Image (spheres, rainbow, N blue to C red):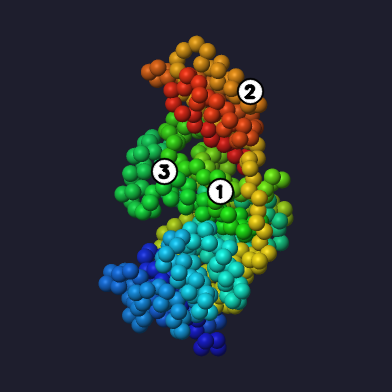
């Protein structure tokens, strides 16, 4: 028999993840009790539809139709927020839980990316904790790694593939030879896309995760608005093939690092070496690479979504609270998190550039001149077979600033030689 009183959970949101948490608590009660040194029990739950069949019994749990009411219950010690959304019921309920003396476990990346600083301050002033392992990379314990296992390191860079849907589309474009639109439709049919698909393919979902990791890694206030975002919608099958010919894969890659200019945060499509761990990552799997001054580089790989993996991450946070492990929300007290200066320009890198040129004399010379005027030198250039009146050209630049390349792209758009808008992708050094 556990000597400590049971840890009582109130779970708000009984979708895929919430149902998974209920299953773990019901099916593994003895294991959880042995590992936590106390029983872990559910006392109350909340969801929009009480009558929905979820494949797990909810008998014995009090039902609240309003998550805020659940958050205020006296028989709840930990409020588990699995509703989603950066405002509305999720935000209201989390604030109510903290004000009512509860610890909070959440899988809500959007809420924390937009309101993490204020919520962390609220929690820590009241002596409570917010844990959110499940908000980033599903079942991969990346937050715990940064907060605890790597606490003795000065983190130099964090990067990774953090949206399984985008990785599924990009890897299957190469494997199947199908284009972006066909694979987007397949993801919709398989239920891989968010209700707003742009959260996935536009990089927003992954950008939320990157902003949270940046805060923990560098001791800064969460600043999602400073994340450079670019989705995968403009990636064409020919880009996938051209990258492969050069020994690269295209990934929606998140990178954050502290530079002399400030905090760099970007979630953009990049070319990565096909022999690298990130280059070999297939399907819907996630991967996070952390570099520190003591460990050099570690690689964390695993399922980034799904009932089991995400519920596992939620339970990891619950177990820490049950054991009495209490860590500030972002690793250091919220009041000590600094407001970072966003890096106005990313660090230098070579770029892959695909340009559709009109088939007429002098077109190539104009593009080369514009790049030269912007201080960008060409490493290699290749003209492909004509398509109607267009002559596709591939250019790989030497290292340059993205800001310089953007000036060049703007100048190109004002010429009369382009047939399609250029596609520019960073080549990331791993």
Residue at 39% in and 38% down: 180
Which type of secondary structure does the marked residue at label 3 adopt? helix
Seen in the picture, residue 179 relative to 254 is either above or below; the reply is: above
Q: Is residue 160 above or below residue 392?
A: below
Q: What residue is disc 3 on?
A: 169
For the residues marked 3 and 2, what is the alpha-carbon distance in whole angstroms? 37 Å
Circle 2 crowding by C-alpha within 10 Å: few under 14, some 14–19, many from 20? few
Q: Work out how far the residue at label 2 is from the one at label 1, CA to CA, in angstroms.
A: 29 Å
The answer to whether any part of residue 422 appears in the image is yes
Residue 326 in view of the camera: no
Q: Earlier in the sequence, mark 3 or mark 2?
A: 3
**Residue placed at 50% from the left, 26% from the top?**
413
Q: Residues within 10 Å of mark 3 (few under 14, many from 20)?
A: many
Q: Which mark is residue 227?
A: 1
* Left or right, residue 341 beside residue 47: right
Q: Secondary structure at mark 1?
A: loop
Front of the two marks 3 and 2: 2
Q: Residue at x 61, y 72 (%)?
A: 124
- Near-viewer residue (267 or 183): 267
Q: Residue furthest front?
A: 414
Q: Looking at this view, is 272 or 328 the one in front?
A: 328
Q: Which element type, helix, strand or loop, lies under badge 2? A: helix
Residue 373 — which label? 2
């Amino acid at each position: 028999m556990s000597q400590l009183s049971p840890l009582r959970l109130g779970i708000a949101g009984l979708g895929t993840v919430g149902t998974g948490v209920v299953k773990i608590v019901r099916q593994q009660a003895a294991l959880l009790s042995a590992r936590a040194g106390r029983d872990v029990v559910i006392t109350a739950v909340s969801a929009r539809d009480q009558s929905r069949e979820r494949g797990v019994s909810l008998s014995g749990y009090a039902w609240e139709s309003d998550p805020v009411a659940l958050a205020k219950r006296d028989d709840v010690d930990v409020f588990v927020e699995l509703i989603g959304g950066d405002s509305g019921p999720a935000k209201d309920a989390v604030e109510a839980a903290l004000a009512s003396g509860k610890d909070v476990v959440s899988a809500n990346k959007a809420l924390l990316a937009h309101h993490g600083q204020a919520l962390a301050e609220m929690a820590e002033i009241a002596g409570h904790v917010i844990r959110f392992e499940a908000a980033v990379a599903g079942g991969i314990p990346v937050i715990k790694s940064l907060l605890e296992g790597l606490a003795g390191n000065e983190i130099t860079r964090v990067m990774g593939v953090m949206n399984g849907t985008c990785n599924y589309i990009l890897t299957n474009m190469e494997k199947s030879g199908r284009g972006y639109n066909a694979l987007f439709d397949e993801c919709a049919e398989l239920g891989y896309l968010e209700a707003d698909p742009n959260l996935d393919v536009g990089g927003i979902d992954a950008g939320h995760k990157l902003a949270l990791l940046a805060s923990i890694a560098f001791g800064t206030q969460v600043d999602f608005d400073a994340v450079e975002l670019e989705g995968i919608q403009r990636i064409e099958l020919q880009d996938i093939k051209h990258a492969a010919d050069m020994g690269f894969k295209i990934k929606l890659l998140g990178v954050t690092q502290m530079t002399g200019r400030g905090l760099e945060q970007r979630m953009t499509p990049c070319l990565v070496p096909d022999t690298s761990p990130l280059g070999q990552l297939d399907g819907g799997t996630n991967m996070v690479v952390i570099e520190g001054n003591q460990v050099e580089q570690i690689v964390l790989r695993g399922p980034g979504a799904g009932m089991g993996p995400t519920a596992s991450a939620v339970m990891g946070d619950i177990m820490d609270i049950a054991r009495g492990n209490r860590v500030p929300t972002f690793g250091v007290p919220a009041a000590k998190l600094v407001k970072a200066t966003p890096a106005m320009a990313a660090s230098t890198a070579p770029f892959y550039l695909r340009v559709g040129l009109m088939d007429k004399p002098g077109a190539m010379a104009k593009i080369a001149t514009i790049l030269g005027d912007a201080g960008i030198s060409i490493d290699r250039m290749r003209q492909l077979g004509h398509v109607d009146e267009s002559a596709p050209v591939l250019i790989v630049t030497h290292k340059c600033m993205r800001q310089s390349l953007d000036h060049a792209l703007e100048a190109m758009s004002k010429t009369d030689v382009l047939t399609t808008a250029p596609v520019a992708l960073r080549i990331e050094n791993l």
